[in-house]
Image: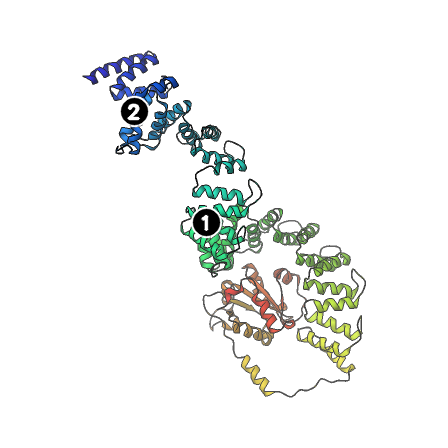
């Protein structure tokens, strides 16, 4: 009977609605709704949400209308299961809806929440937005906050940070504590307002402590976003975040321990934190953990694990550069130039200047891609413009040789100069040599002298020798044999410089004439590969001494024979060193190889070619698969077309080249260019221990040892 009456009242409401009499329609729908007539409830809710029927109670009515308030409280009981009431979202929704229709604003907020999350009804974001807005207009703090969330997240409404910020600010003014975090985020990220880290910190500190909140506070202190950097406070808040299980806090606290910022540097603690965060899926921590394995900080070096983690990590300039380098040099994985290029390019796209430099060298040499000097030049230029010091040297070469651009000696000089401005002593020498020899520019001994002196004052041993030349010949400065002698002795001793020292002692230039000392230095120079036989003979004649025919020491012969047993070339899949040399120098070369093999290095040289196999193809494959390439410099090797072919091929394949000079030679421009800035080892100038120490410091050479 009641439902029939309700239906009749509802129909009257429909007629009023058709006549656009919303007030009467709402009144009829409301009466029918009180009889629990579902169509009337839906129609009334629609009128209210469309703003065609105002139902929000005034403060006076709100305080006097206990029925709607009691209905609301009953809904809260059903929603939360309080006051001995079982949780029943459907009944809670019905209570909130009835109370909201009756104009009770707090119920409207709860009704919006039910619609937003589908509690007791179907999820309906439009209805959620409508009821939140009704309640917010009635100054319900929670509704203002919830409406702000919908605008902030673009949930059921067009995303609008400006409106969200205004709502959060209003909610905070009403002391709605949940709004503090959102308002802090707005200030932190500049959403709906200008970035203001000081205010962000102020509101984050008001929020109930949680992992993400402590992490954000730690970031503000670590990066000095509010005031100056305060690493101890950052560490304190990161640790709180760690205690809450926040992986970002674990990662950032690990970074503080890794760098020793605000805490005592501790790679072990850093490793533990990175690993914990990484195991929990933090992609940034994957990269830091990879660094630990790559550099052996807090863990044993493991390039394979490092690569796996870099590949899992969040893509970044650093990570892409590391992956590219690992593939380029075959660290813990076979060399794969295509993959190296792929990851270097990703790094370039992210603005990594090191990737620009490395990718530029591959295009320059044609490694894994078509040789393209234009692309190489563009990459070197972009990297140098962004401050990549190493790129200036390559860019200088491009300008000097006209690769990828027109020859421009002036620009080549400018880029050498920029590298020099950053304190690069090798660039000082390179530019000095250009001025000294007049290569591509006007010969200028004065400028060469200044550059050599600057590099020499910074203790570059190669510069000592060039500066000595200036003093010896009076190029760019007055002749000063005494200073020349001091600098020759101070610099790298090799055949040429040793012969110069002998000449000074022989002629008594700047020092007391001493033929015995001269003879001693000529002999050293001769042993280093500089042909000084005529000098030795001349001094011996002056001293009335003939070279002695020493009797053969059988013991020494036997010892030497034992050391010259056949040396086996490495056969296997592990990283190894390819050796390029002239067979004329076999005796000296094999002495060096014996030393390296005794130290545990894997060596391959052409005696490892099996009978019946293609000589050229075998050599090419051996160079391709090697990680390092030793080039023995002698007057024979630099004039050998086969040795030069091997060197060119190794350079194109971007192998790590280790030049070992076994005699003093004047190399061609091409060999000088191929060897670049690589530090040369002078075998005859170094004691065995010192030679091995320098060899062991070669780039990534440890991967070639057992």
- Tell me if I can see residue 248 in this picture: no
Please state if 63 lies on the left or on the right of 317 as rendered: left
- Gap between marks 2 and 1, in whole Å? 47 Å
Q: Nearer the viewer, residue 132 or 553?
A: 132
What label does residue 250 carry, if any?
Answer: 1
Q: Earlier in the sequence, mark 2 or mark 1?
A: 2
Q: How is the image coloured?
A: rainbow
Q: Residue at x 26, y 16 (%)?
A: 10
Q: Nearer the viewer, residue 234 or 543?
A: 234
Q: Quadrant of the N terminus?
A: top left
What label does residue 98 carry, if any?
Answer: none
- Tell me if I can see residue 604 in this picture: yes
Q: Nearer the viewer, residue 191 or 247?
A: 247
Percent position of residue 575, x then y: 49, 65
Quadrant of res 90: top left
Residue hosting label 2: 71
Of labels 2 and 1, the one closer to you:
2
């Amino acid at each position: 009977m009641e439902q029939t009456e309700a239906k009749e009242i509802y129909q009257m409401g429909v007629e009023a609605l058709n006549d656009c009499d919303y007030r009467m329609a709402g009144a009829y729908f409301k009466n029918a709704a009180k009889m629990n007539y579902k169509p009337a409830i839906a129609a009334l809710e629609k009128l209210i949400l469309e703003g065609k029927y105002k139902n929000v109670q005034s403060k006076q009515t709100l305080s006097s209308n206990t029925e709607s308030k009691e209905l609301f409280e009953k809904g809260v009981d059903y929603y939360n299961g309080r006051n001995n009431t079982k949780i029943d979202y459907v009944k809670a929704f019905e209570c909130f809806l009835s109370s909201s229709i009756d104009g009770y604003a707090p119920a409207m907020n709860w009704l919006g929440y039910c619609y937003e999350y589908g509690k007791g009804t179907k999820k309906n974001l439009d209805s959620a937005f409508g009821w939140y807005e009704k309640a917010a207009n009635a100054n319900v703090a929670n509704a203002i906050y919830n409406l702000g969330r919908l605008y902030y997240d673009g949930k059921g409404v067009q995303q609008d940070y400006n409106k969200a910020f205004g709502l959060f600010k209003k909610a905070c003014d009403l002391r709605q504590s949940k709004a503090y975090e959102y308002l802090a985020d707005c200030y932190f990220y500049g959403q709906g307002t200008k970035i203001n880290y000081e205010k962000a910190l102020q509101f984050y500190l008001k929020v109930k402590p949680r992992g993400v909140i402590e992490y954000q506070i730690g970031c503000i202190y670590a990066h000095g976003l509010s005031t100056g950097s305060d690493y101890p406070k950052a560490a304190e808040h990161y640790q709180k975040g760690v205690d809450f299980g926040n992986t970002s806090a674990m990662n950032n606290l690990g970074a503080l321990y890794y760098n020793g910022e605000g805490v005592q540097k501790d790679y072990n603690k850093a490793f533990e934190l990175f690993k914990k965060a990484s195991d929990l899926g933090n992609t940034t921590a994957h990269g830091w953990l990879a660094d630990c394995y790559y550099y052996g900080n807090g863990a044993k070096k493991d390039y394979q694990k490092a690569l796996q983690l870099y590949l899992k990590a969040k893509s970044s300039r650093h990570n892409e550069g590391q992956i590219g380098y690992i593939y380029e040099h075959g660290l813990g994985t076979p060399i794969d130039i295509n993959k190296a290029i792929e990851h270097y390019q990703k790094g370039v796209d992210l603005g990594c200047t090191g990737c620009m430099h490395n990718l530029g060298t591959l295009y320059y040499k044609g490694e894994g891609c078509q040789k393209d000097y234009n692309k190489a030049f563009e990459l070197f230029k972009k990297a140098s413009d962004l401050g990549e010091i190493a790129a200036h040297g390559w860019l200088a070469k491009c300008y000097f040789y006209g690769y990828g651009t027109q020859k421009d000696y002036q620009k080549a000089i400018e880029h050498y100069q920029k590298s020099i401005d950053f304190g690069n002593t090798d660039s000082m020498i390179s530019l000095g040599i250009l001025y000294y020899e007049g290569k591509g520019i006007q010969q200028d001994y004065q400028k060469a002298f200044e550059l050599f002196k600057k590099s020499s004052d910074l203790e570059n041993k190669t510069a000592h020798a060039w500066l000595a030349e200036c003093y010896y010949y009076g190029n760019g400065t007055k002749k000063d044999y005494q200073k020349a002698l001091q600098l020759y002795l101070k610099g790298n001793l090799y055949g040429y410089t040793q012969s110069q020292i002998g000449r000074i002692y022989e002629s008594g230039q700047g020092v007391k004439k001493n033929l015995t000392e001269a003879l001693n230095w000529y002999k050293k120079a001769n042993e280093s590969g500089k042909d000084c036989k005529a000098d030795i003979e001349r001094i011996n004649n002056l001293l009335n001494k003939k070279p002695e025919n020493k009797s053969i020491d059988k013991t020494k012969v036997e010892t030497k024979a034992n050391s010259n047993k056949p040396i086996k070339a490495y056969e296997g899949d592990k990283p190894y060193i390819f050796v390029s040399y002239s067979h004329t120098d076999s005796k000296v070369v094999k002495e060096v190889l014996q030393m390296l093999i005794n130290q545990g290095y894997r060596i391959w040289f052409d005696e490892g070619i099996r009978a019946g196999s293609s000589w050229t193809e075998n050599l090419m494959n051996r160079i391709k698969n090697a990680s390092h390439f030793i080039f023995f410099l002698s007057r024979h090797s630099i004039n050998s077309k086969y040795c030069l072919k091997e060197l060119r091929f190794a350079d194109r394949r971007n192998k790590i080249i280790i030049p070992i000079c076994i005699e003093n030679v004047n190399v061609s421009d091409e060999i000088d260019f191929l060897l670049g800035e690589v530090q040369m080892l002078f075998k005859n100038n170094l004691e065995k221990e010192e030679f091995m120490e320098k060899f062991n410091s070669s780039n990534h050479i440890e991967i070639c040892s057992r």
